Amino acid sequence: MPYRTHALPGIGGRIRTVDADFAVDEVPAYPPSGDGDHVFVHIEKRGLTTVEAARRLAVLAQVPAKDIGWAGMKDRHAVTRQWLSLPPPARPEAVLDRDTPELTVLAAVRHRHKLRTGHLRGNRFTLIVREVGEAAEAATRARAVLDALAAGAPNWYGEQRFGARGDNATTGLALLRAGGRGGGAPRHKRLLISALQSHLFNAWLAARERDGLATTVLAGDLLQKLATGGMFASADPAVDQARLDAGELVITGPMFGATMRAPLPDSPAWLREAATLAEVGLATDAFVPIANLAPGTRRAAAIHLGQPEVAVVAPDAISVSFSLPAGAYATAILRELQKHPEGFGAGPAADPRADATAEPSAETPEDLE
């Protein structure tokens, strides 16, 4: 995939030599109220997935693990702080002062309802990049990249989205071609189809980047108002381009599905999305037979970093901090910073031999988002 900051040198280096090098702080959508039947628990975890942390809290609070809520999954291989909610009849004192090396309860506060997926504003990341050579020089390069991304960074899906072996999108394509038959439980099927949707979004965005159109409004583009979230199709690209350049709008890309809102038919934007599907041998109505697994949606093509900061922490290491909205991946920013040649997010080709009997990778729900 192309770099938005291809003209600027990267810093190289290594991340996550230890879990503490990757810290994530969830930014909640609202604070707990202090009253109600549910208990919001603020935790710090390391070496645990969100699901594993929830199971430990369930044992302490003596409540069913399936009834514990969270706003988003957090990675196992990091130090992450997030909120979870415990159902009635949980008590705050049941989980306080019961810390382990992997799980610390920072606060337990009552609230009136369960915490649900998406109830967060975003995440704050603090990352240590080691083996960067002269740290002061690397910090200067990092600041230049972050400054260049101030107008918007590509909203790539990170490699975590594609499974432990990186083949979930290929398996999802096989599942789609089989009409949704096979592939295991519905939840697992949705995971595989989601990986395919994510790969196709990345492919669409990569094509616009390569063609110099990632920040150019095309006729028919579906644009989102940043202030309200409202969406409309561009009928006057020149007018809408001025609003995009002013930071009022963002171009959206396809998370293909049966009911996804598409660009204006036969418009330049529509043709590009159809070409993305054609590259893997799919028609524009390919997702209709699996509407229950893939309704589809739109995704912002660009994200804005909040409060980027860079600091030297060792002769050959720097820290990089920034905030991202919910659903965005820190690895997409690291990719621009480091510019390692390997890249991420390999996906399927138009291979007619693909079928639904392929063995999927293990699930990796703890996306860094």
Image (spheres, grey):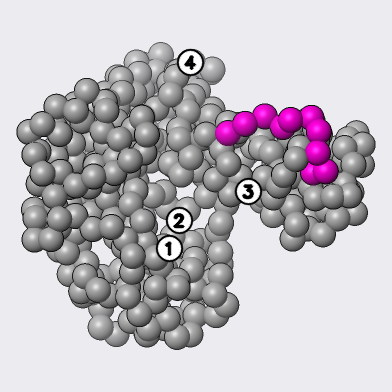
Q: Which residue is mark 1?
A: 194
Q: Residues within 10 Å of mark 2 (few under 14, many from 20)?
A: many
Q: Secondary structure at mark 4?
A: strand
**Sequence order check, earlier mark of 2 and 3:** 3
In contact (CB < 8 Å): disc 1 and disc 2: yes
Residue 260, visible in the rendered structure: yes
Q: Which residue is mark 3?
A: 116
**Sequence order check, earlier mark of 2 and 4:** 2
Q: Secondary structure at mark 3?
A: loop
- At 47% from the left and 28% from the top, the residue drawn is 323
**Sequence order check, earlier mark of 1 and 2:** 2
Instruction: Give the label, 1 or 4, closer to the camera.
Output: 1
Q: Residues within 10 Å of mark 3 (few under 14, many from 20)?
A: some
Q: Which residue is mark 2?
A: 161
Q: Position of residue 316 (x, y in %)?
A: 47, 22
Amino acid type at circle 2 is Arg
Q: CA distance from mark 1 to mark 4?
A: 36 Å
Q: Which residue is mark 4?
A: 311
Q: Secondary structure at mark 2?
A: helix
- At 69% from the left and 38% from the top, the residue drawn is 83
Q: Which residues are magenta?
A: 29-39
Amino acid type at circle 3 is Arg
Quarter of the image where one finds residue 21 = top right
**Sequence order check, earlier mark of 3 and 1:** 3
Amino acid type at circle 4 is Ala
